[in-house]
Amino acid sequence: MTTQTRRTFLATIGVAALGVASRDAGAGARARRHKLDLIGLQLYTVRDLMKADMPGTLERVAAIGYQEVEFSDYFGRTPRDVRDLLDRNHLTSPSTHLPFESLRNWQKSLDDANTIGHAWVTIPSIPEEKRRSVDDYKAIAAQFNRAGAQAKSSGLRFAYHNHDIDLKPIGRVRPLDVLLNETDPALVDFEMDIYWITFGGGDPIDYFNRFPHRFPMVHVKDSAGPPDNRMVDVGQGEIDFRSIFAQRDKAGIKHYFVEHDQPVDPIATIRNSYNYLHSLEF
């Protein structure tokens, strides 16, 4: 082989190798992309439809593609009735929202949750008169620990869902930080409402970094941004869900529930939001 031929041969190999490496790198990048395996819906979004026709509404939710739902009300149905409706529509319900007052008869709520098939029992808010000081929040945290221990004994997990008020500082302390610091991770989980965290001036990823593995559930709702921060269908606002979901392992996220508090057309909203999340890669 002449010197020139050898140089040409080596150059050809180099170009080919570079092409293979580029393809491999591209394939690797594609392989590292993720999509949501399960997309859930917080049924508060369709509460008026649920009240009028719970069986028909769950059927429509499932037809869109949702596989999981989170309840906010059972509209007078028995736990067995709710379980039957879920089974009929091939839905599961990992979590339910229960009023703070349910802690007074907590075991009944836990028993009902087990009948329906929930894994989490979630308190969505704290009454105003019980959360006026840091000491109030510390007392609530202790109550959550007790409720979490009872839930654990019943084979369930306890969780708390935040609103923006939990980000409003009392002195120099954010109440949500008090709850996270004062509750036992073995007993108490948190369901991050991404919209309300953002609205309250917090950063979801900052919370994931400071409190890893505390957020097995998130509410996925979008914001049009300042000045009014109007809720919009998921994917039509300014919240960067791709970056947030990319931190899912650190956060501990297992369930993603679409929500919109005041949709003009609830079915259009949950369909638009599902389609966006179904196509989202991160």
Image (spheres, rainbow, N blue to C red):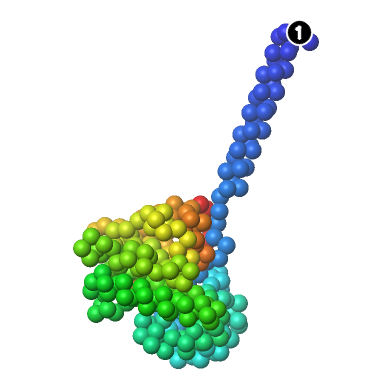
Instruction: Give the camera-side residue of 263 and 219.
Output: 219
Question: Tag 1's secondary structure?
Answer: loop
How far from the left and from the top, in percent, is residue 190?
42, 68
Residue shown at the point (55%, 57%) measured from the top left = 35
How far from the left and from the top, in percent, is residue 233?
40, 64
Residue shown at the point (37%, 64%) measured from the top left = 181
Give neighbour class at mark 1: few <14, some 14-19, many 20+ (Cα, 10 Å): few
Q: Vertically, is 8 above or below 247?
A: above
Horizontal arrangement in the rendering, residue 120 relative to residue 30 (left or right): left
* Count of marks, rendered view: 1
Q: Vertically, is 44 above or below 52?
A: above
How far from the left and from the top, in percent, is residue 17?
67, 28
Q: Amino acid at mark 1?
A: Thr
On the image, numbered disc 1 is attached to which residue? 2
Occupied quadrant, residue 165: bottom left
Q: Is residue 152 visible?
A: yes
Occupied quadrant, residue 262: bottom left
Residue shown at the point (26%, 62%) measured from the top left = 173
Horizontal arrangement in the rendering, residue 44 relative to residue 15 (left or right): left
Occupied quadrant, residue 18: top right
Residue shown at the point (25%, 64%) measured from the top left = 168
Q: Vertically, is 130 above or below 197?
A: below
Instruction: Give the camera-side residue of 120 and 60.
Output: 120
Looking at the rendering, in which quadrant would you find the N terminus?
A: top right
How far from the left and from the top, in percent, is residue 39?
52, 66
